[in-house]
Amino acid sequence: MTIGIIVAMRKELDLLLHLLSNTSETVIDGFTFFQGTIGKNPVVAMQCGIGKVNAAMGALTLINNFAPQRVINTGVAGGADKSVSVMDIVAARQVSYHDVWCGPESPWGQVQGLPLHYDASPDLLAMVPNRNDIKVGLTCSGDQFIDSMEKVQSIKAKFPEALAVDMESAAIAQVCYVRKVGFMSLRVISDSPGASKDNTQQYLDFWSEAPQHTFEVLKQMIQQINPE
């Protein structure tokens, strides 16, 4: 089974590429794809760039050219709930947009004619390890860096169950939904507004403190997937 893995930033990609064996590179439409293996499964990894448009373009280019059976979006996210801490991992059971409003005929967050929530592929969700530092729930996406409690509270007012916020997951999920490809978002919490340290500084410090083992969860999950 071919697994597509998408990250937004080069720092995330550098952590991810350590997981791959037998790596080769292909450039298509300005995106660099790294083909390799994790366990017995072929993997295609890419950096899409930050934000929803980049994420959607990257996901569609990946699907059109490599036909993965599953796509996993990984990297970092901001915490949106007291139950998650920096260095925790959020496995999204569902993802939604927090910044979409199509008018009174649709609920906040829903692109008209599409789901409000995009569900994770059940087989991927079932492989998430049962650990105290891994939380399963809702991740919300929007084209904003969430750097204050006021912004978190605005999102939580509409999505009280949200655990994490990012800028790409829902856009990738939407492409996967339309193209009928299983999807999941697996994100490490890099900062959390309202914690003791300024959250922008948390985010900057995270990159010097981030342990490689946070991405090992992804490796463990892919190694469980039946390659057929």
Image: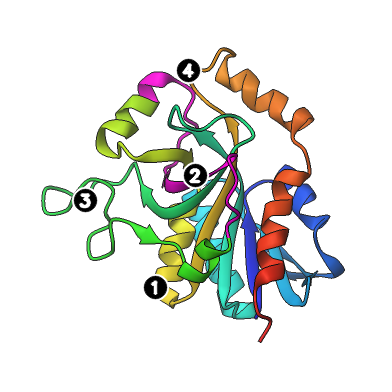
Q: Is residue 134 magenta?
A: yes
Residue 82 lies, in percent from the top left, at 45, 27
Could you tell me which quadrant the N terminus lies in? bottom right
Mark 2 or mark 1, which has the lower sequence index?
Answer: 2
Give the foreground label among 3 and 2: 2
The quarter of the displayed image where residue 180 is located: bottom left
Q: Are marks 1 and 4 in contact (CB under 8 Å)?
A: no
Residue marked by disc 1: 178
Give the foreground label among 1 and 4: 4
- Classify mark 2: helix, strand or loop: loop
Towards the viewer: 127 or 175: 127
Residue marked by disc 4: 194
The Cα atoms of the two marked residues, 3 and 1, are separated by 19 Å
The Cα atoms of the two marked residues, 4 and 3, are separated by 30 Å
- In the figure, 125 relative to 63: above or below? above
Could you tell me which quadrant the C terminus lies in? bottom right
The Cα atoms of the two marked residues, 2 and 1, are separated by 19 Å
Residue marked by disc 3: 102
Mark 1 or mark 4, which has the lower sequence index?
Answer: 1
Span colored in magenta: 128-151
Q: Amino acid at mark 3?
A: Cys
Disc 2 packing (10 Å; few <14; some 14–19; many ≥20): many
Give the foreground label among 3 and 1: 1
Q: What is the image's colouring?
A: rainbow
The Cα atoms of the two marked residues, 3 and 2, are separated by 19 Å
Q: Please report the residue visible at 51 percent of the width from the left and 60 percent of the height from the top.
A: 184
Q: Is residue 10 magenta?
A: no
Mark 4 or mark 3, which has the lower sequence index?
Answer: 3
Q: Are marks 3 and 1 in contact (CB under 8 Å)?
A: no
Residue marked by disc 2: 167
Give the foreground label among 4 and 3: 4
Residue 173 lies, in percent from the top left, at 45, 61
